[in-house]
Amino acid sequence: MTLLKNFSFFILILLIQSCASVSAPEPVGPVPSSHQLDWQEMEFYGFIHFSINTFTDVEWGYGDKSPELFNPTELDTRQWARIAKEAGMKGLILTNKHHDGFSLWPSEYTDYSVKNSPWKNGEGDVVKELAEACKEYDLKMGIYLSPWDRNHADYGKPEYIDYFRNQLTELLTNYGDIFEVWFDGANGGDGYYGGANEVRTVDKKTYYDWENTNALIRKLQPNAIIWSDNGPDARWVGNEHGFSYETTWSPLLRDSIYGGMPDYNIKYAMGQENGTHWVPAEADVSIRPNWYYHKSEDNKVKTLKELLDIYYRSVGQNSTLLLNLPVDRRGLVHENDEKQLKKLTAQLKEDFANNLASNAKTTASQVRGNASDYSAKNTVDGNKNTYWATDDGVTTASIIIDFGKPTLFNRFLIQEYIPLGQRVKQFSLEAEVDGKWETIDNQTTIGYKRILRLEDIKATKIRLTIEDSKAAPLISNIEVYHAPLIVDVPKVSRDKQGNVTLETPEDGLSIYYTLNGDEPSTSSLKYSEPFHLDHPTTLKTFSIDPETQRQSETLSENFEISKNLWKIITLDGTSLSEEAIDENPLTEWSANKELLSNYKIDLGETTTIKGFTYTPTQGRWVSGVITHYSFYGSKDGHQWTKLSEGEFSNIIANPIQQNVMFDKASDIKYIKLIAHKIMNDSDKALIAEIGVITK
Ligand code: FUL
């Protein structure tokens, strides 16, 4: 007995010694601060866009509208917070002041605020009400304060910076803990500016003196994440689709960047392997096409499939997700938005219901110092603080996850232990099916979290191979799931002749539709071949699997008059390329500014139009986007009337179809869109589509 005891003691000493001799890996590259780590773990939080814009139906206010327009009838921040909480969001960021300068709190430094609105007789404070609601629902609160202020008389002068900091101080002092401070890169341009009505450009690099503004934030809210194109704590993902990139590094060449710089999205948004600072990506997107509430978008709330895609391409690609819920004129998140959000939450719960890897058997090709502290088991122990590591210098290694029996899966979730830096550059995944290994994916970065969506596969084992890494890979977590398949809505398209095609996302599905506004069911029209639609019509449609009865959501699509008779002609009568009127937003007409005044679109017959649409190029990186325009109509193609003039607000960051309504309807046969300003002061405009609104 004593002998056995002594022996066990000896083994124990040996074990302790072997562990003690294995040092922890050293950090590699920049590493996150503790508040950046806490922030990253929030993963999903919400944006609220609400202002005078909500009442004037625009995306960017000019700064000249009366504060009396701000008059929500049922404003209820508790409703916003409840919806966010139920959706699994961890916080809410409110646009306290957008580019139009209207402040949602009674700021001491301006009259352009809620205090001069009829809401609560000027006694209200939206920020305070939201702070209270967030507290009640255990949500963190963040602030958006637009650096650009189109209302303020001093914008562009040094005095404005004091104003900006004074407002910031109010927001960071009077409303409790703030988790994130959001600084928009859009700034400078035309505006009201206290009645000057002029263009004011600023040097984005120097005007705001960010160093001292950031120092003020650090003093008032040391734990807040400061967000902008160049952080310093978190960065813009470079688009407003809510997508990060398959290769997304958290390190960033931060000092090469300034807020609002051109080409940021192309050159920097994905982060850099050799980035000098830890500035992780945040993917922002609205649940509707635009950020503010527009009644015309009530049936354009993103589908479940679109929302899921956003989740997987943000949280699942080493980014956080900031999802915007526009608040409507009542002061509430609209029912349709809540409904879609609920679907997303329920689906995510199902997708991640049963972790097939928890406690699976694991073996690694190499373990740091052969120490149990760094064993492969750490990847499936549910503890984020333990990780599998290899010896220093070993940058290729693999780990096998053995389910013990054939197991059906289609999701692979993996996390690096980021407190010691982001390391993995390339990895692959294989599955062992009937005793044979097959490659099922090849990918690049992992970072805080990567979730791969795979085809259904039944395998007994999975092998993860880290093919390349900046240093010894540190993998803290692996999860495997079998997410249920969901049926997507039909893909709807119409050609120039007016023929509508509905396509099923998967083989073997049936499609039903209505054209009279009724909700479709399996007793509605069944789609078999393209049909003709010439007149404004609402199409409602869904897909269904006749065998399993799995059914998609219903998609509602509003069609305008068809472009069957439309022609683009130059002033000398020659027809031009029809890409701008072919109903296909993926083809575009490229024309230089000059040519743009020398053409007309012939609608083929006199038509009563109430507005027009312009769709910019839909490629991954936009160019040739018209930002300032005028739009003309003519009965005879010679005498032209200007029907509208203005800016396409936010079109560069969010290049979606622009819908412009006229003050009054016009009977015309010819139309013409003129570009006054094209992004990056280019001379070449790209037009994916021009349309008219008749309804
Ligand atoms: C953009 C702004 O210009 C939009 O209006 C919106 O606020 C979005 C979140 O950021 O850059």
Image (cartoon, rainbow, N blue to C red):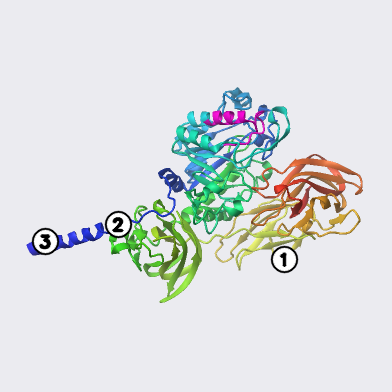
Quadrant of the displayed image that contains ligand 1? top right
Name the residue that disc number 3 marks: 5
Task: Give the SS element for disc 1.
Answer: loop
Q: Amino acid at mark 2?
A: Ser
The location of residue 657, given as percent across then percent down, is 70, 50
Disc 1/disc 3 C-alpha distance (Å): 82 Å
How crowded is the residue under tag 2: few (<14 C-alpha within 10 Å), some, or many (20+)? few
The mark closer to the camera, 1 or 3, is 3
Lateral position of residue 428 relative to residue 166, left or right? left
Is 486 on the left or on the right of 655, as rendered? left
- Residue 617: x, y in percent? 70, 54
174 in relation to 641, above or below = above
Residue at the farthest left position = 2
**Location of residue 26 by image quarter:** bottom left
In the image, the segment drawn in magenta is: 145-168
Decide whether residue 148 is among the magenta residues.
Answer: yes
First along the sequence among labels 1 and 3: 3
In the figure, 663 relative to 659: above or below? above
* Residue 493 visible in the shown view: yes
Identify the image quadrant of the N terminus: bottom left
Amino acid at pointer 1: Glu
Q: Earlier in the sequence, mark 2 or mark 1?
A: 2
Q: Which mark is residue 23?
A: 2
Q: Which residue is mark 1?
A: 529
